[in-house]
Image (tube, grey):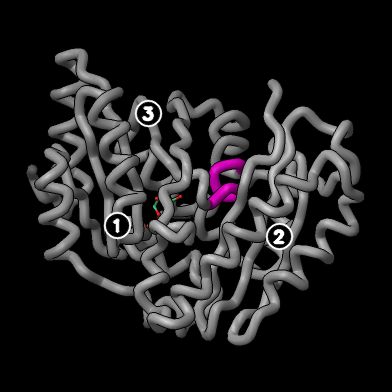
Amino acid sequence: MEIIEKNIDLQQKLQLLKIEGKSIGFVPTLGALHEGHSNLIRKSKRQSDITVCSIFVNPTQFNDVKDLEKYPRTLDADSALLKGLKTDFLYIPDKNEIYPKGLDTKVHLDFGNLFTVMEGAHRPGHFEGVVQVVKRLLDIVNPDQLYMGQKDFQQFSIIQHMIKMLHIPTELVVIKIKRENHGLAMSSRNERLTKDVRNKAAIIYKTLKAVKRKIKTHDFEFLKSYALKKLAIPDFNPEYFEIVDGNTLQSIHHYSDSNYIVACTAVWAGNVRLIDNIIMKKTV
Ligand code: AMP
């Protein structure tokens, strides 16, 4: 595995590989890697000829400065894990590489409803930062495949929209959620939970599954308030629980209203904010 810090070095190497006809798979991350990230790398290794993983804690997507400061940085362990998975390139740019002075890196595109619901409503500016960094990384890496997790459901919906609208020649591949044994979706933020709260956080997936069992027979308004109540155990504070169309992220009200239905939630567990989702119906 080669560790690269400068765009120009990465671009030169990837260009040569592309000329040889190799396909490039790209896994962008914030680091503090876990088995969820490993699955993205494994998929890229299977599907693409060359795998590039980036670690960049992007300041523009953190709407909360404290969250940015507290974000775990574990480069040595990350690097060892990626090496073990036979990642070809680990790209660790600094801020000046991603946001050089004088370059307008903002994405000027209308995301409509995709930006305003769920995470967009509760984390102002977050998705503007996400599309900014992903677009910039795509410009630098120019991958054939981009691997992202279903865990951040709204994020990949937005990136899919951007790829389509800007005609970016990259295929987005979505990887299912990797969970801890008791069901909690793996996240770098889980490390900040106390042992007790981490155990109790199993309630999130339990609630998503309970709603899925009832989805065909119960009113959606009832299900949403049922879920919010079920999630409100001591130390836990649900922020939202929404049942939406998997493409448009518009709220839906009846099982027959869409072929693709997803329930998404954000929950404060102690002082850590966790997100999770489950696909309720997909018949397309
Ligand atoms: P992050 O470092 O949190 O920005 O995540 C980098 C990528 O890994 C994103 O595409 C996430 O959706 C994905 N990811 C994070 N956690 C998981 C998980 N538990 N299972 C699958 N993918 C994940």
Q: Nearer the viewer, mark 3 or mark 2?
A: 2
Q: Residue furthest top?
A: 21
The disc label shown at residue 145, or none:
3
Disc 1 residue crowd, few under 14, some 14–19, many 20+, Cα 10 Å: some
Going by the numbered disc 1, the residue's amino acid type is His
| Disc 3 element | strand
Q: Position of residue 116 (x, y in %)?
A: 74, 57
The answer as to whether callout 3 falls within 8 Å of ligand 1 is: no
Question: Which image quarter is the C terminus in?
Answer: top right
146 on left or right of 18:
right
| Of the image marks 1 and 3, the number of the one nearer the N terminus | 1
| Disc 2 element | loop
Residue 187: name its quadrant: bottom left
Q: Nearer the viewer, mark 2 or mark 1?
A: 1
Q: Is residue 190 above or below residue 52?
A: below
In space, the residues marked 3 and 2 are separated at their CA atoms by 27 Å
Disc 2 residue crowd, few under 14, some 14–19, many 20+, Cα 10 Å: many
Q: Position of residue 157 (x, y in %)?
A: 61, 41
What secondary structure do most residues of the magenta stretch adopt?
A: helix
Residue 118 makes an appearance in the image: yes
Label 2: which residue? 118
Label 1: which residue? 34
Going by the numbered disc 2, the residue's amino acid type is Met
| Of the image marks 3 and 2, the number of the one nearer the N terminus | 2
Going by the numbered disc 3, the residue's amino acid type is Gln
Question: Which image quarter is the N terminus in?
Answer: top left
Q: Residue at x 24, y 57 (%)?
A: 93
The answer as to whether callout 1 falls within 8 Å of ligand 1 is: yes
Residue stretch rendered in magenta on the structure? 152-157
